[in-house]
Image (tube, coloured by chain):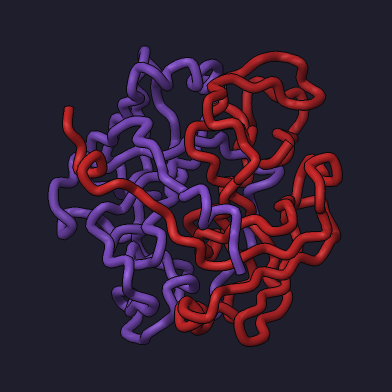
Chain colours: A purple, B red
Amino acid sequence: MILATDIDPMVLKSIGVIHSPYQKREDIPRQGRRSQEIFEIEIFPEFVPGLKDIEQCTHLFVIFWLHLADRSKLTAVPPHDGREHGVFATRSPSRPNPLALDIVELLEVRDNLLKVKGMDALDGSILLDLKPYSAGIDSFPDVRIGWQKENDIGSSIQ
Amino acid sequence: MILATDIDPMVLKSIGVIHSPYQKREDIPRQGRRSQEIFEIEIFPEFVPGLKDIEQCTHLFVIFWLHLADRSKLTAVPPHDGREHGVFATRSPSRPNPLALDIVELLEVRDNLLKVKGMDALDGSILLDLKPYSAGIDSFPDVRIGWQKENDIGSSIQ
C-alpha cells in the first residue's frame, strides 16, 4: 500500500518551547493534573497570530514532543502497576510517535507567553499544538480503564 | 536559539489507516462525538504488539494526520460563528501541525482492527497515536470556551 504520507513525509514544526520547573525525568510527577507548578509556554513570534482569543479558553490541550522517548518500544510497564501493556493502552512516553498530550488550566496570556498549570513536561520540550478544551465534546466523566486498580494511569512522561 | 529538534527533525511514522464512511470533506459532520457512524482503525502489522490490553479501554484518544489541511493558516472562522479566531483557540484543521484529536468509544478489537464510534476523520487518514482516556485526568465537565455561544466548537476537520 502506498500512502499519501509516504510521498509527502509528516514533518512537524516547532511552534514554541515549554519552560518547566522539571529539569530531569526523575523530577516529574506521575500526573500533571495534580501538579501545582506553574509552566510558561513560549510561542515563537511567527505563530503568535494563532493565539487570538485564546485567553477566552480556561483549559487547553497541549501537544508536545517527547524528545527523550524510545520510539522502538511497543509495550510498557506503568509505575505502580507492574504488568506489561501495549503502549497504545498506556500513557507511556515510549511509543512510535512520541506525542505528549496534557490538559492544562490557562492562567494568563501575555504577548507570546502563556502561564499554565497541570503539566508534566520537561524543561525545553517543543510545543507542537494547542487546542481549546470543551466539556461538550471532550469530557467523559465516567470513563475508567480496565487494567487500572484506581483511577490513575500515570504521567505522560514517566 | 538552536533546539534539539532542529538537529533531529520530528518526523512522524504512519502506524495505521482509518477507514471512514466520509469520502469528502463536505460529508463530515461538525462533531465526531455526535456521529453514530462506525469507523474501522487498521493498525499496521509491525505495531500490533502496542495494542495489548487495549480492549480494556472504553474510550481512546485518536491522533491522526489532517493531510488536506492548510498549514500556513494562523486564523480560522468556525462554522456558525462568523468571527475570526486564532487557530490555537479553535479546533480548525488549518494549523501549523495538522494533528487531529478525536475521543472515540471503542466498540470491538479483532486482531489489528479496532471498531470505534465518535470520529470525524476522512477515509484514508493516517493514524499517528492511540492513548487511553481516563476520567481522572482527562475529564473537566464544566469547561466552556468564552467565544462560543453554545457548547459547540465544531469539527476537528471542518
Q: What residue do we see at 63% from left, 65% from top?
A: B17
| Residue A148 appears in view | no
Picture quarter with the N terminus of chain A: bottom right
Above-or-below relation of A54 to A157: above
Residue A54 is situated, as x and y percent measured from the top left of the image, at 52, 22
Residue B78 is situated, as x and y percent measured from the top left of the image, at 72, 25
Q: What residue do we see at 42% from left, 73% from top?
A: A87
Residue A69 is situated, as x and y percent measured from the top left of the image, at 27, 61
Relative side of A124 to A31, left or right? left
Relative side of A152 to B143, left or right? left
Q: What residue do we see at 71% from left, 52% from top?
A: B121
| Circle count | 0
**As rendered, which of B57 and A152 lies closer to the eye?**
B57
Above-or-below relation of A57 to A60: above
**As rendered, which of A49 and A139 lies closer to the eye?**
A49
Residue B61 is situated, as x and y percent measured from the top left of the image, at 57, 59
Picture quarter with the C terminus of chain A: bottom left
Above-or-below relation of B65 to A85: above
Q: What residue do we see at 31% from left, 84% from top?
A: A82
| Residue A70 appears in view | yes
Name the quadrant containing residue A140.
bottom right
